[in-house]
Image (cartoon, rainbow, N blue to C red):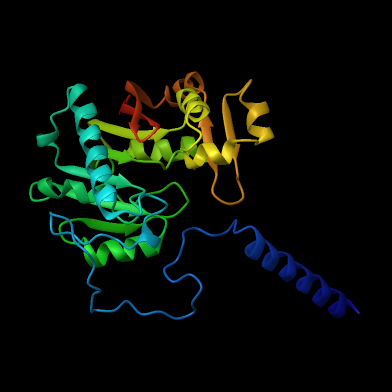
Amino acid sequence: MFNKSRKKLVNSIKDVVKSVLRENGYTQTYIPFERHSNEYVVKHSKISYPVCDYGLPIPPVELRSGYETDDKEFIENSRQDIKNLIEIAERSGMKFEQTKTILDFGCSSGRMIRSLKPYADTKEIWGTDVNADHIYWCSQYLKPPFNFAVNTFNPHLPFEDRYFDLIYSGSVFTHIDNLIESWLLELRRILSEDGRLYITIHDNHNMKVFDNDKQIPLSVYLQGNQFYEKSRKDFDFIVLNRSKSPQVFFDIGYFNKLVHPMFEILSVNHESYGYQTGILMKRK
């Protein structure tokens, strides 16, 4: 009788665990390569992709994380975002040419990192992402001159303390909710003493942009969203679509308080990454 009850309890627990894994993915630590396959091979042979004028292959549309489907626009916007990053960093007193180590945190399939090719001979440049499909593609087609590693959803990166002179993260903190402080602390850990951290966020300014431009895909998503419309009247922090791909919005005053123990904000740059706001910081 005892064994029968015990077996029933064990099976019940197994069913709950399977349900959590299947429905919520709470225990998923990263997005595996070929996630729906039980077996896979990374081939030695390479597919012939179109290349940019730096001689680097351009990723297929399905690996572009919703960014431009047109190859020319994909490359042009990549270079503009890197140009903005360098100019913003240098306005803060940083000499970009003297940086030795750079991290693209949340590099996807290398949209921004590829535009650092002219500097790759004199700098150690890394890209990390939770999506192994993206990292495997980058490792096959963009390495060398760049280096890549899969990171997890948990706030830890496999680098030494104060390793990077410049860390940038485009449209990553627009999707992180509960672990914001933990990830900022981890990026602070690996940022050099006088290094720069550049991240992009959705803030109050972006909300006005969405109000005025109804053609932006995220603006289309927000139209008629009653929770968003109600919440924006009084908020520090809003999270939408949490179960799939969270969309995170900060009140800029709240964001300042959030980072204050960790970083000094050097500049707030509206629409420096598409419509997103770029925040440049250094460690305290």
27, above or below 241, in the image? below
Q: Choose between 14 and 93: the one closer to the eye.
A: 93
Question: Going 67% across and 34% down the picture, which residue do you hit?
Answer: 227
Q: Quadrant of the C terminus?
A: top left
Q: Residue furthest top?
A: 253
Q: Choose between 138 and 151: the one closer to the eye.
A: 138
On screen, residue 6 versus residue 72, left or right, reads right
For residue 23, which quarter of the picture?
bottom right
**Residue 189 placed where, x, y %?**
34, 38
Question: Going 33% across and 61% down the picture, which residue do you hit?
Answer: 135
Q: Quadrant of the N terminus?
A: bottom right
Residue 165 appears in view: no
On screen, residue 148 versus residue 176, left or right, reads left
57, above or below 112, in the image? below
**Residue 117 placed where, x, y %?**
14, 50
Number of numbered callouts drawn: 0
On screen, residue 21 versus residue 49, left or right, reads right
237, above or below 99, in the image? above
Q: Residue furthest right?
A: 1
For residue 230, which quarter of the picture?
top right
**Residue 244 placed where, x, y %?**
58, 52
**Residue 119 placed where, x, y %?**
11, 45
Question: Going 46% across and 27% down the picture, which residue do you hit?
Answer: 209
Residue 11 appears in view: yes
253, above or below 100, in the image? above
Question: Going 35% across and 50% down the picture, which residue do you hit?
Answer: 68
